[in-house]
Structure formats: structure tokens, C-alpha cells
Image (tube, rainbow, N blue to C red):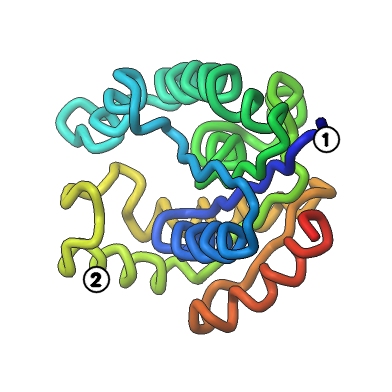
Amino acid sequence: MKRGVFIVFDGMDGSGKTTQARMLVELLRKKGKKVLFTHEPMRNTKLGRYIEKRIRDKKNKPNSEELLELFSKDRDAHLKNEIIPSLKKGRIVVCDRYYYSTLAYQLEKRQWKNYIRRFLRPDIAFICAVPEKIALKRINSSIKKNERRSKKKAIFEKLGVLRKLKKKYMQMKIFPEVRIIDATPSPERIFEKIKKEAKRIVG
């Protein structure tokens, strides 16, 4: 059986990546494609739930080393138990966040290439990019509208942190599979670009 296609959406919180991932999943399923829509950290495991709790612990903030270990362990399990088995069955895997988040949030650029050797490289990765002020505005709006799983902000959801994250995400164009997407227009306009790029590898 032909190996499936591995598609990733990444970017800082408030970039619109989850909306775009969902739109692509919906389109692919309408076309009759078998799709696994998944997320990092995993939401159906004890470790995944623990990570979600830790990144919102402002009284006892986790350091980069702890988070690097937690996210890497979660990713190993994710690949072994969900992503690789689905790809072997010929499915399309759409993942909301992957190792690009670890590169941006926990590692320096000089560490990137060595780190990603440990993991399966996606066929294409869409990095959704917006100015940090727009990202923060979207975060606050989604909390106010009760659109998020948690009302508590993550420790990274501050203007200064978002500014640094954006710079690092923009540097990821060095990877051949990465497409930097301007995510400031309407979701529909953004999706037109994503749809064209995805069509090249999915058909």
C-alpha cells in the first residue's frame, strides 16, 4: 500500500493554524480521503494532559529543559502510536503542531538540525505567521468567546514572547518542506493558498 501523506500546521498561538488545519481536513474528507487529524501534545494521553497543565502553571513555571523532555517524549509516542501507523495504512495525517513548535519555543537555531534528525520529517509544513499584536488580540478574543479548551493562558502567551517566537518561525524557511503563510487576511483567503500547495502533494 502506498504510504500516506504527512501534513503539519504550526505557528505561535493566535496565528490561525488550527482553523486552517480544520478547513483542510474538512475539504479532504469531502473528497473521500481517509484523514487522521491529530494534535501535539496528544490530548488523549496522561502525558499530553500533564503537558497542557504544565504550560499554564504560572506559579511554578517549567523551564525549557523540562518542556523539551516532555514534548519530545510525547512526540515519540505520537509517532509510534498514531502518525506512523496511519501513514502505513495510506492515510493523510494532518497534525496541529509538531517539532517546529519545539524549535521555536525551546531550542536555539544552532540546535535545530540535530534535534529534528530524531523524528519523521513531514511532506509539507505550513507555518502560519501573523504580527504578535494580532496574535495576542486573537488569543484574548478566543478566550472571551469561550472558543478554547482552557480559559487560562499558556505561559508563552505574552507580547514579548510572541515577538521572539515570530522571528524564529520566520527563520524556518530554511527547511525545504516549510511554507510560510501570511495568516493576516480572512481564513478563506489564507486557505486558497494552502489548498493550492496541498493539492500538489495530495492530488
* Up/down of 26 relative to 57, above or below: below
Can residue 42 be seen in the rendering of this structure?
yes
**Mark 1–mark 2 distance (CA, rounded to whole Å):** 42 Å
Residue at the extreme front: 32
Give the residue at x 54% y 26%: 82
What residue is shown at x 20% (from left), y 32% (from top)? 57
* Left or right placement of residue 85 versus residue 102 in this view: right
Q: Name the residue under label 2.
A: 141
Number of numbered tags placed on the structure image: 2
Under mark 1, the amino acid is Lys
Q: Is mark 2 on a helix, strand or loop?
A: helix
**Residue 161 locus on image (x, y percent):** 41, 51
From the viewer's perspective, is 139 left or right of 106?
A: left
Which amino acid, mark 2? Ser
Q: Residue 83 carries which label?
A: none
Question: Which residue corresponds to mark 1?
Answer: 2
Is tag 1's residue or tag 2's residue first in the polypeptide sequence?
1
Residue 80 drawn at (x, y percent): 59, 17
Question: What residue is at 51 percent from the left and 47 percent from the top?
Answer: 96
Considering the numbered disc 1 on the image, is that residue within a helix, a strand or a loop? loop
